[in-house]
Amino acid sequence: MLGVDYLWRRIQHLASCLRDKLALTDGVTVWDSGFVKPGIMTFTLEGYGSKEIKRLLAEQSRWINVSTSTFRSTMLDMQARGLCEVVRASVHAYNTEQDIESVVQAIETLRDTH
């Protein structure tokens, strides 16, 4: 049995990898705050709306599932940051580092084709 502590550390590791790699990607802004960050992260990609990113990632050969969050669902936070919408990507313990690379590469491809 792996245990909850192991799973939490695994999720934290994968989410941190995704945040760090996307934060280093030109045109991407990672919007997460707080000292302890969960397995869900939020970001925007310059020149794209969140629904468009969601659709384009779902069309990749290696299907990537993300969700979106709008001003209506987190009004105070979005208002404070001057945002209307963000993309929400989440990882779980079953994800791999290759999954993280696939997401980052797909975002870079979107950025380069826009």
Image (cartoon, rainbow, N blue to C red):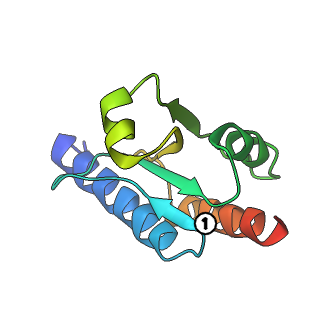
| Position of the C terminus by quadrant | bottom right
Residue situated furthest top in the rendering: 72
Left or right, 14 with respect to 52, comes to: left
Residue 20 visible, this angle:
yes
Q: Position of residue 69 (x, y in %)?
A: 50, 32
Q: Residue at x 69, y 69 (%)?
A: 108
Q: Quadrant of residue 10?
A: bottom left
| Position of the N terminus by quadrant | top left
Q: Position of residue 47 (x, y in %)?
A: 70, 58
What type is the residue that disc 1 sits on? Val
Note whether 53 is above or below 68 in the view shown: below
Closer-to-camera residue (89/80): 80
Left or right, 111 with respect to 46, comes to: right
Note whether 35 is above or below 92 in the view shown: below
Mark 1 nearby-residue class (10 Å; few <14, some 14–19, many ≥20): some
Q: Position of residue 50 (x, y in %)?
A: 63, 42
Note whether 22 is above or below 65 in the view shown: below
Left or right, 2 with respect to 50, comes to: left
Closer-to-camera residue (29/108): 29
Q: In the structure shown, which secondary structural element does the residue marked by tag 1 occupy?
A: helix
Q: Quadrant of residue 44?
A: bottom right
Instruction: Find disc 1 in the rendering and name its residue.
Output: 104
Left or right, 76 with respect to 106, comes to: left
Q: Residue at x 41, y 63 (%)?
A: 19
Residue 39 visible, this angle:
no
Q: Position of residue 99 (x, y in %)?
A: 58, 59
